[in-house]
Structure formats: C-alpha cells, structure tokens
Image: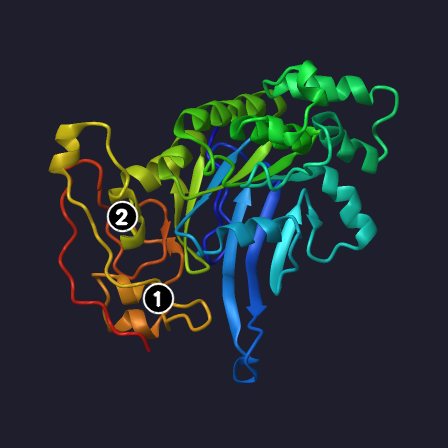
Amino acid sequence: MTSPAAIAPEGGPSSPVGSGAEPLLRVRDLVKHFPVRGSPLRRRDQVHAVCGVSFDLHRAQTLGLVGESGCGKSTTGRLVLRLLEATSGSVRFDGEEVTAASKSELRSMRPRMQMVFQDPYGSLNPRLTVRSLVSEPLRIHGRFGDGGRARVDDLLERVGLSVEQASRYPHEFSGGQRQRIGIARALALDPDLLVLDEPVSALDVSIQAGVVNLLEDLQAQLGMAYVFIAHDLSVVRHICDQVAVMYLGRIVETGSRDDVYKRPAHPYTQALLSAVPVPDPDRERARRRLVLKGEVPSPIDPPSGCRFRTRCPKAQEICATEQPALIERGQGHPVACHFAESLDVVNPTATPAATSSEPLPPP
C-alpha cells in the first residue's frame, strides 16, 4: 500500500498526500433514492439510501467504506459502477462521466471497472465450469481468441487455484475457493478499479486472511484501485489506505487509516471502534465501551439536521436544525459533527469525551 487516497469533504476536493495526479475515480454529491412501492398512501415516499456522498480514489489506492448494515455502502459501490442509476450526482472514472455515458460508452468502460460480490456462491452460475465462468468476460468482449485458454489458466494460478480445477463446478469448492474464482473472473479484463462488496464477510476467519492477503498481492502486482466495502473494521484497517465511515446514507468521518483508527472524532466512529475486540486482555478490560442507545432511524424519514443525533450522547439543539458539514474541525481530517472531539477508544489512557446532554427525540 502507498500514500493515502483523498477523500473530498464538502466544499471541494482534497489532494492526495505526495501526489498531484488526477484521481482515477471522482465521486461528487452522489444521491440515490428508491421509491416505496405498496400502499397508495405511501406512493410518494422514498428510501434515502445515499445522500451527497463525495470522495476521490487514486490508482493503486484502497478506500474502505464502513458502517452498519443499511447505511448505503453497498448501494454506493453499485452506483459507482452504474449497476444502479443515480438519482443525482457525478461519477467520473479516469476523466469520463459514468452517470451520463451512453450504452456504447459504458460498454467500453466496463472492462476497466469490475466488481467482486459478497456471496461467492450466489454470484457464480452453478451450471458452468470454472473455466467457462472465468472465460465468460473474455468471450463477451471479444478477447478470448487463440490465447484465451492460456489466459484463464494464468488467472486461476494467480488467485491460488490449480489448472486441474478448471473443469469443476462451483459446488465442488469451498467458500474461500469460490471467492477466488470470483476474483479471477473480475481480473479477466485487466481492470483498473475493483469494487469489493464485503468480499470476506461470508468466509471463516481463517479463510478471510488468505483472501485479504491475495487482494493485497494482486494490488501490488497490477496497480489496481480498490473500493473495499465492509463492516469488519479490523479487516478494513489491515487493507485500506483511506477510510470513510457512513451512517444512514451519509459519510460522517473520513481520513487516513491512522486518522480514523487512532484519532476518531465522530461519536459514531468512536462507538464502532469501541466494539472491536482488542487482542490483549489487560487493555480490553481497561478500555471504556461506548454503547449506542436506540435504533437506527428509518431511511424513509431520516431525522432533520444531523442524522445521528437521535442516538448521539452529545446532541444539542443545533444538531436538530443544522446539518453538520463534512469538514476539517481541528482534528486533522474531515468530520461531520458540530462537537467533534478526538478520542482514542482503543488506548485506555486516552481522555474520555466530555459528557453531553441526552439525545434529542426524532422530529
């Protein structure tokens, strides 16, 4: 891994550390609303899945999108690849606008943007052999030719599978091996960007390490950029250069890996990190666990102002009336909180955050 990718806070993009190059992927004010179908009384309601997400990602960098289930991170990944149509906003890939691209333009972009899905079995056609699955992208884009078979053999070996396994079917493999097949298929067209949608969450812990190490090796060899979507913060810390924490469709804190893990400033980020076990019994017993009260609000009717305020121990009147901008507030990285305060929740010697008033009720 190299120098951190850049996250664009509200008010304009930021530049990557030590690099003046244009980002490979530039996302600005990305929005996705899903209509609510069913009752005629709710015909105008919408699910606010993604609301104003912005970030930059440079070549050979890894951006981690983390948050609870339903926060919009997987939807963001699909919007980047235009597997879903955005309600508004901009996605520029290597200088080309993805959201406004025609079918022919999008088809020319597709080989350079690929996805690895969460379910390694559901994403593979059970009727096809491994060789057919991995060669399918090559055939669709007219790249199989005379060297196609050798290309498939090379891809299988690159992800740690043997050529002898190419004639088998997906059900004959373990979960980790199936995910390696999915990665080989994604690599078939030499992409510049991989969107990894929780690629190890369905795997055993012992298998996760092998897949994560494989992804790191492939990035070092091929120079790809990753959007790594996950809820396992320990995995994200291991593989990502930059981290963006999402809550109810918005990015609430961004920064380098060290910024977010060692100096978290948003109460939600602090609560997430305090839930991660520390492999040291003495430190684990000494540190303070931050427990959130209440449930995540409905994305159909999100709270006014700060969306986290209904569960936040620091909530004040301003949190209900004014949405906090994602800007640098003295902690060294952008935070969307009116009362941002750095707190090391892993180190028990860190100074606890000041006690604040009770959370405000929903509007």
Label 1 sits on a secondary structure element that is: loop
Q: Nearer the viewer, residue 263 or 357?
A: 357
Label 2 sits on a secondary structure element that is: helix
Which part of the image, by quadrant, shows the C terminus?
Answer: bottom left
Residue 16 appears at what percent x and percent y? 49, 38
Q: Earlier in the sequence, mark 2 or mark 1?
A: 2
Q: Is residue 63 above or below residue 268?
A: above
Report the residue marked by disc 1. 306
Question: Tag 1: Cα neighbours inside 10 Å, few (<14), some, or many (≥20)?
Answer: many
The amino acid on which the numbered mark 1 sits, given as a three-letter code, is Cys
Residue 153 appears at what percent x and percent y? 72, 17
Q: Quadrant of residue 180?
A: top right
Report the residue marked by disc 2. 270
Q: Is residue 315 visible?
A: yes
The amino acid on which the numbered mark 2 sits, given as a three-letter code, is Gln
Q: Quadrant of residue 131?
A: top right
Tell me which residue sits at (18%, 46%) in the image: 289
Residue 136 appears at what percent x and percent y? 77, 34
Compared across the picture, whether 326 is left or right of 79 comes to left
Q: Is residue 349 visible?
A: no
Tell me which residue sits at (41%, 24%) in the image: 206
Compared across the picture, whether 240 is left or right of 174 comes to left
Tell me which residue sits at (69%, 46%) in the image: 95
Tell me which residue sits at (29%, 65%) in the image: 309
Q: Is residue 100 above or below residue 184?
A: below
Q: CA distance from mark 2 to mark 1?
A: 16 Å
Residue furthest out toward the right: 146
Disc ID at residue 188: none
